[in-house]
Image (spheres, rainbow, N blue to C red):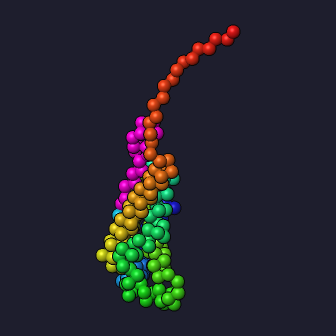
Amino acid sequence: MELTRLLAIIRTHWVATFACICVMVLFTLAVSFALPPKFTSAASILVDVRGVNPVLGVSESNTVLPRTTLATQASMVRSEGVARKVVSQLGLDRDPAFVAAWHDDVESRGDLTAWIAKKLLKVLDVRPNAEDSNVLDLQFSAKDPNRAAAIVNAFAEAYMSTALQLRSGTHKLTARYIGPFRVIPCSLRNRVSGVS
């Protein structure tokens, strides 16, 4: 359609066009005032998984982690264990609003901490920052900006403490399995045997 023809159509139906625009603007304003505001807080985590070079015995860091490693770390952030740490760290299991919602939803059956953890995980968004980045971005939305910031920061802290526990636990298990290393000196002797 040509531009001149489109302008001619709008000129002939300008009242209907103006009325549609006014209705859309009023509807958008009504919805934005009717819905409660939501605040989104964000945190970033640099994932630095260092591997040990088996030949040199020194730790090396990959410049860019594979997508599977970042996906594994993102899954760890979204795990129920990390969410439970957040609930206990912030004392959300003693929050009257969460306790009342738990009572209304499941009539106080089951584990309150697990229920709150699942509710938090539904709102938490974890994704890699960019294609060639080792940074995970965490976002959490809530009606209260202070609560959103506290929860997203608690998720970052709980993830880091969980990752540290897993890493130190693996080293302890490896040391217990392999045991201390001892260097045993040995000498090689070349024996020449004659065949008669």
Q: Nearer the viewer, residue 71 or 185?
A: 185
The residue lying toward the viewer, choosing from 62 and 134, is 62
The x, y position of residue 148, in whole percent, is 35, 74
The residue closer to the viewer here, 103 or 189, is: 189
Question: Image quarter for residue 18?
Answer: bottom left
Position in image of residue 115 (x %, y %): 48, 79
Please identify the quadrant where the C terminus is shown. Answer: top right
Query: What is the residue that sits farthest to the top in this orientation?
Result: 196
Question: Image height check: is 138 above or below 62?
Answer: below
Residue 190, placed above or below residue 181 = above
* Percent position of residue 10, x then y: 44, 71
Residue 143 in the figure: left or right of residue 194:
left
Q: Is residue 29 magenta?
A: no
Determine if residue 38 is in view.
Answer: no
Q: Quadrant of residue 192?
A: top right
Q: Is residue 53 magenta?
A: yes
Identified at 42% across, 87% down, the residue is 99
Residue in the foreground of this view, choosing between 5 and 55: 55
Which percent across, then down, holds residue 144?
33, 79
Q: Is residue 44 visible?
A: yes
The residue stretch that appears in magenta: 44-64
Judged from this view, the residue extending furthest toward the front is: 196
Question: Among all residues in the image, which is located at the extreme left?
Answer: 146
**Residue at 38% across / 61% down in the picture?**
160
Q: How many marks?
A: 0
Q: Name the residue: 51% across, 23% down.
A: 188
Q: Residue at x 44, y 73 (%)?
A: 84
Q: Is residue 132 above or below residue 36?
A: above
Judge whether 53 appears above or below 80 on screen.
above
